[in-house]
Image: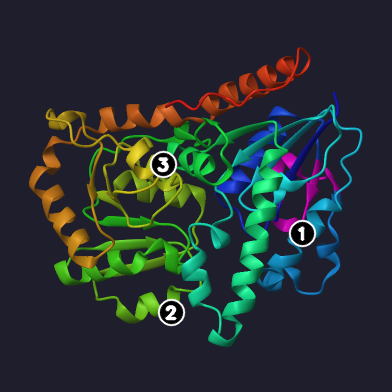
């Protein structure tokens, strides 16, 4: 069986790269097709397997200027030659679902999110464009939405990384999707003997992560906060941070493990499709204080009358005041959180669970293709 894995780009090692790395492990003979990317960030299990890049790879500075080339993405995707493959796995958060495959090929799309700049983030994206170009952006987005919907109809089966994303796939593409949560290596987690007395933030320092809310809240409360990560927001965040905020930048996995294990709780203010850091913190038995929308509502246990069953606390709004209130509520009941129970919850999202469920999902699709048309997977909870 000839298998191809298609992904958009590798410019850092984040959630998509971790998922693709497992795809490479599950299908060791698969070829890799990319829109463009930096070879330094190709996942370990996929190195040496790039069969083709799209024409975009030849453009100077593509890894920095790619945002302005959205209108030509569909043409670049259509230029990837996938003839002769029996199975195509697209790792998609934009255009990769639009690859052209043979009639008898099975195309599985693992959807991290529908294309955000033209769907749920259309208005914020439009606001970032100069006003004189708003009509051009609006027309371009309309064309891309029509193309994206059409491309989604050519996928044989969708797999979503959360119930939140499955609902968006249904809304925008009118397609069902099976929920298989992304892989998190929870086996590395351990429970420390004591807490270091600090709160923790982990992730890229970008505007969508809303790390500014965490910095502002802990500055006003006088609580120690360690911020792990790098990004274009670093300078601004340091400018608003008080003396209790410590920025450690990019650190090794070993250092991060120690910081996770000894934190008081992870603070998470982003509206994420899944949120790997939320699960990673729980694998060390640490509670999480998170914004109550998106993936965090699926990976945390909250609201139980038996407080020992809870693994975190959620706050309803992305505001400093909401974060402050959540921290205070947490500190009033901190003693009730049970590290062993929190760690147990994280095991539901372990890499081994992902591998088993995804392989079974693909095998079922391949088997179904031999007996007739492939029907959408039934959307159900984890």
Separation (CA) of disc 2 from disc 1: 29 Å
Q: Position of residue 24 (x, y in %)?
A: 71, 35
Q: CA distance from mark 2 to mark 3?
A: 26 Å
Q: Is residue 25 left or right of residue 99?
A: left
The range drawn in magenta is: 32-51
Q: CA distance from mark 3 to mark 1?
A: 29 Å
In percent of the image, x 57 and y 61: which residue is there? 118
Q: Residue at x 64, y 70 (%)?
A: 139
Rendered image quadrant of residue 22: top right
Q: Quadrant of the N terminus?
A: top right
Give the residue number, with chain letter if any, for mark 2: 235
Mark identifier at residue 36 = 1
The residue lying toward the viewer, choosing from 105 and 191, is 105
The local crowd at label 1, few if under 14, some if 14 to 19, many if 20 or more residues have their Cα within 10 Å, is many
Q: Please report the residue visible at 17 percent of the width from the left and 61 percent of the height from the top.
A: 324
Res. 95 mark: none
Q: Earlier in the sequence, mark 2 or mark 1?
A: 1
Q: Is residue 80 magenta?
A: no
Q: Which mark is residue 280?
A: 3
Q: Is residue 141 left or right of residue 254?
A: right
Q: Foreground residue, 145 or 276?
A: 145
What element does badge 2 sit on? helix
| 324 on left or right of 35 | left
Q: How is the image coloured?
A: rainbow
Q: Earlier in the sequence, mark 2 or mark 3?
A: 2
First of labels 3, 1 by sequence position: 1
Residue depicted at 12% across the width and 50% down the height: 329
- Disc 1, SS: loop
Q: Residues within 10 Å of mark 3 (few under 14, many from 20)?
A: many
Residue reaching furthest left? 332
The reply to whether residue 223 is visible in this rendering is yes
């Amino acid at each position: 069986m000839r298998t191809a894995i298609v992904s958009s780009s590798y410019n850092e090692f984040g959630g998509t790269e971790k998922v693709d790395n497992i795809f490479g492990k599950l299908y060791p003979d698969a070829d890799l097709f990319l829109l463009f990317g930096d070879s330094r960030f190709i996942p370990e299990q996929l190195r040496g397997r790039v069969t083709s890049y799209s024409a975009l790879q030849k453009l100077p500075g593509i890894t920095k200027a790619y945002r302005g080339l959205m209108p030509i993405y569909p043409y670049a995707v259509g230029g990837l030659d996938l003839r002769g493959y029996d199975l195509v796995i697209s790792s998609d958060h934009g255009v990769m679902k639009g690859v052209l495959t043979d009639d008898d090929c099975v195309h599985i799309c693992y959807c991290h999110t529908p294309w955000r700049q033209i769907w749920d983030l259309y208005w914020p994206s439009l606001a970032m464009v100069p006003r004189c170009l708003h009509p051009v952006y609006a027309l371009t987005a309309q064309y891309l939405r029509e193309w994206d919907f059409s491309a989604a109809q050519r996928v044989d089966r969708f797999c979503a990384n959360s119930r939140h994303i499955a609902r968006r796939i249904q809304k925008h593409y009118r397609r069902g999707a099976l929920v298989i949560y992304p892989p998190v290596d929870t086996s590395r987690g351990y429970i420390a003997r004591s807490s270091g007395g600090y709160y923790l933030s982990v992730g890229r320092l970008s505007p969508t992560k809303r790390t500014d809310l965490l910095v502002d809240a802990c500055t006003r409360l006088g609580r120690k906060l360690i911020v792990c990560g790098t990004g274009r927001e670093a300078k601004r965040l340091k400018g608003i941070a008080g003396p209790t905020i410590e920025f450690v930048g990019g650190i090794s996995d070993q250092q991060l493990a120690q910081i996770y294990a000894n934190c008081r709780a992870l603070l998470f203010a982003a509206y994420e499709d899944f949120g790997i850091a939320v699960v990673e913190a729980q694998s060390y038995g640490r509670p999480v204080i998170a914004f109550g929308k998106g993936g965090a509502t699926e990976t945390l246990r909250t609201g139980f009358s038996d407080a020992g069953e809870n693994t975190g606390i959620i706050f309803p709004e992305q505001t400093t005041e909401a974060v402050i209130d959540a921290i205070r509520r947490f500190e009033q009941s901190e003693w009730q959180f049970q590290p062993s129970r929190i760690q147990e919850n994280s095991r539901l999202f372990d890499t081994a669970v992902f591998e088993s469920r995804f392989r079974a999902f693909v095998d079922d699709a391949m088997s179904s293709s031999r007996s007739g048309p492939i029907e959408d997977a039934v959307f159900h909870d984890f």
